[in-house]
Amino acid sequence: MHSILPLSRAAALFLGLAAGPALADPAVIEAVEARRSGPAWTFSVTLRHADTGWDDYADGWRVRAPDGRILGTRVLVHPHVEEQPFTRSLSNVTIPDGITEVAIEASTLTGGWEGTLFPVSLAD
């Protein structure tokens, strides 16, 4: 026989799980440098993450417009266990007219896109 939990108990269990500790540690964006390169931009992003090897590492970062559009993505194809923090760049990122600030978001292999945004002012 199957039993159905009362709504309040089910909600409490769900909320307890949702409020529990995260299984993966997010990558931390420590610094971002944005440089105009002709009509496009180059972003250099410094990340820190407790990379443990091929099973858990920071696997990328992306540039997001204020409306959420992805303007560029830097894929990181290997762990940086012995190189922390580390900086990687992405060139030829086109920023639409009128945008004066973007945000950088990091990803890890185990946690995906973390959702924490690092704001970057685009000053010429």
Image (spheres, helix red, strand yellow):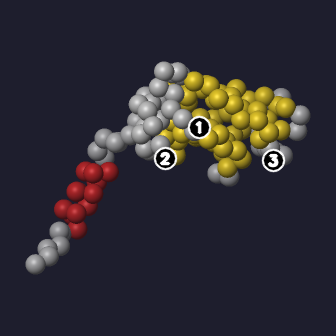
Q: Is residue 58 left or right of residue 13?
A: right
Q: CA distance from mark 3 to mark 2?
A: 26 Å
* Residue at the (38%, 40%) spot, across then down: 24
Q: Residues within 10 Å of mark 3 (few under 14, many from 20)?
A: few
Q: Nearest the camera: 87 or 66?
A: 87
Q: Name the front one of labels 2 and 1.
A: 1
Q: Is residue 121 visible?
A: no
* Residue at the (50%, 32%) spot, across then down: 79
Q: Residues within 10 Å of mark 1 (few under 14, many from 20)?
A: some
Residue 55 in the image: above or below residue 70: above
Mark 2 lies on residue: 112
**Residue furthest to the bottom:** 1
Question: Quick one: label 3 or label 2, which is nearer the N terminus?
Answer: 3
Q: Is residue 41 left or right of residue 60?
A: right
* Residue at the (73%, 29%) spot, across then down: 34
Is the N terminus in the top left, top right, bottom left or bottom right quadrant?
bottom left
Q: Amino acid at mark 3?
A: Pro
Asked whether disc 2 touches disc 1, contact meaning CB atoms under 8 Å apart, the reply is no
Secondary structure of the residue carrying numbered label 3: loop
Q: Name the front one of labels 3 and 1.
A: 1
Q: Position of residue 67 (x, y in %)?
A: 67, 52
Mark 3 lies on residue: 96
Q: CA distance from mark 3 to mark 1?
A: 25 Å
Mark 1 lies on residue: 76
Q: Name the front one of labels 3 and 2.
A: 2
Is the C terminus in the top left, top right, bottom left or bottom right quadrant?
top right
Question: Quick one: label 3 or label 1, which is nearer the N terminus?
Answer: 1
Q: Residues within 10 Å of mark 2 (few under 14, many from 20)?
A: some
Q: Position of residue 86 (x, y in %)?
A: 57, 24
Q: CA distance from mark 2 to mark 1?
A: 13 Å
Q: Position of residue 78 (x, y in %)?
A: 54, 35
